[in-house]
């Protein structure tokens, strides 16, 4: 097979009669979702479980096997070795890349150098760390069954000698305004995947770019729109639609699939955000009723941002950040346990502190009862 030569952007010959109806539906659902985002006082705290869920599902598409609650358990020190630990490290890196990206985009637009930095974070100290993290490939790679020669590949990405040229054209397209921002987002994601600029991690970086690009185009008030739940559930079609571009130039089929994904996921995300907001409002009253403490809001934000935690970590955090005496916090946590708001995952033993969790938020993030 010859290396793929990407289509010139912006694309010609799209079926706008087909696509603009889908664009309208997707745009309406995304606008409703962003309206909810704008009403959240502290989205980074309240939507932290959704960010973790996105990291889990995007990594799952690439083969990792871990759940939201396992990621949170690992952060609290309950999982420290084995294959599961390695999977969770990849997920944690993905989430770190998301957070770093959010900070960067406050002041700067998406650039190739920024994408290389994200890639470096993604592959830090995990499987794939030997595949030149943070560097675009200089070798010809290909996609196919494990160990297959290039002659049997299902897809051969662009020649590395022309890769920089194609990447620069892709970056220029990011800065342009196509006929519609959602249609453009579909093209941006697919073209990046087809360029396949890294030796590993292309799918995850490409999915991180979706909310970042929507934020850059001012279609989201926060770069927090996560699509991997739909893409993971429709993984075979996701890959086939991308393959159809390289084999048949079927951009219309890909864009239609992507717009349907946006519509469905925006609706799902909106529902989950409403449920999280309702839980936050309920707990704001309940935690204060239980503790009668001036620190109740700090407690609430802490268990939302880290719904599984070592009690000693929270004691130290409150002492460091708010000057709360280290003997005060354990009493507040005990009151939340007695009120069944928090649950003990691992009891204290000797010098080891207890590990606590906030079951209702974890179960809400997972979409089922796991704690």
Image (spheres, rainbow, N blue to C red):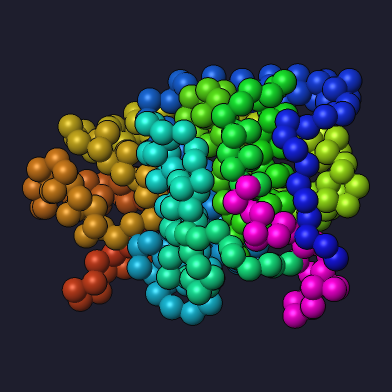
Magenta stretch mostly in which secondary structure?
A: loop
Q: Residue at image x 51%, y 46%?
A: 112
Of residues 208 and 159, the one drawn nearer to the viewer in this rendering: 159
Q: Residue at image x 79%, y 78%?
A: 148
Marker count (numbered): 0
Q: Residue at image x 8%, y 47%?
A: 325
Q: Quadrant of the N terminus?
A: bottom right
Residue 272 placement, left or right of 231:
left
Of residues 364 and 83, the one drawn nearer to the viewer in this rendering: 83
Q: Is residue 352 above or below residue 250?
A: below
Q: Is residue 150 magenta?
A: yes
Residue 178 placement, left or right of 15:
left
Q: Is residue 369 above or below residue 70?
A: above
Q: Residue at image x 13%, y 48%?
A: 319
Q: Is residue 221 above or below residue 232?
A: above
Q: Is residue 274 visible?
A: no
Residue bounds of the magenta highlight: 143-165
Q: Is residue 68 magenta?
A: no
Q: Is residue 322 visible?
A: yes
Could you tell me residue 40's position as x and y percent? 43, 25
Of residues 41 and 204, the one drawn nearer to the viewer in this rendering: 204
The answer to which image quadrant residue 77 occupies is bottom left
Could you tell me residue 202's position as x and y percent? 62, 56
Residue 288 placement, left or right of 257:
left
Of residues 16 and 292, the one drawn nearer to the viewer in this rendering: 16
Could you tell me residue 43's position as x and y percent? 42, 32
The answer to which image quadrant residue 105 occupies is top left
Could you tell me residue 47's position as x and y percent? 46, 38
């Amino acid at each position: 097979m010859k290396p793929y030569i990407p289509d010139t952007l912006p694309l010609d010959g799209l079926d706008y009669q087909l696509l603009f109806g889908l664009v309208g539906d997707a745009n309406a659902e995304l606008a409703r979702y962003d309206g909810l985002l704008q009403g959240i006082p502290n989205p980074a705290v309240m939507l932290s479980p959704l960010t973790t869920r996105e990291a889990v599902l995007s990594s799952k598409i690439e083969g990792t096997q871990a759940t939201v609650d396992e990621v949170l358990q690992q952060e609290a020190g309950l999982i420290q070795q084995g294959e599961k630990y390695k999977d969770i490290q990849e997920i944690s890196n993905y989430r770190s890349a998301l957070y770093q990206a959010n900070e960067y985009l406050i002041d700067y637009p998406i650039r190739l150098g920024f994408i290389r930095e994200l890639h470096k974070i993604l592959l830090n100290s995990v499987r794939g760390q030997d595949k030149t993290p943070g560097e675009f490939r200089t070798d010809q790679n290909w996609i196919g069954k494990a160990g297959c020669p290039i002659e049997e590949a299902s897809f051969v990405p662009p020649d590395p000698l022309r890769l920089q040229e194609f990447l620069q054209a892709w970056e220029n397209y990011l800065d342009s305004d196509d006929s519609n921002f959602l249609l453009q987002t579909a093209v941006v994601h697919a073209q990046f995947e087809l360029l396949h600029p890294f030796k590993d991690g292309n799918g995850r970086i490409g999915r991180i770019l979706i909310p970042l690009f929507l934020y850059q185009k001012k279609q989201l008030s926060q770069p927090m729109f996560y699509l991997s739940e739909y893409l993971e559930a429709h993984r075979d079609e996701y890959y086939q639609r991308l393959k159809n571009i390289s084999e048949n130039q079927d951009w219309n089929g890909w864009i239609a699939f992507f717009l349907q994904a946006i519509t469905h996921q925006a609706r799902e995300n909106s529902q989950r955000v409403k449920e999280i907001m309702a839980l936050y409002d309920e707990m704001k009253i309940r935690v204060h009723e239980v503790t009668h403490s001036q620190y109740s809001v700090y407690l609430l934000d802490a268990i939302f941002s880290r719904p599984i935690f070592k009690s000693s970590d929270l004691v130290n955090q409150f002492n460091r950040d708010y000057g709360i005496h280290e003997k005060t916090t354990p009493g507040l946590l005990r009151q939340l346990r007695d009120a069944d708001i928090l649950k003990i995952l691992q009891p204290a033993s000797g010098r080891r502190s207890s590990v606590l969790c906030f079951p209702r938020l974890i179960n809400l993030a997972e979409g089922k009862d796991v704690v």
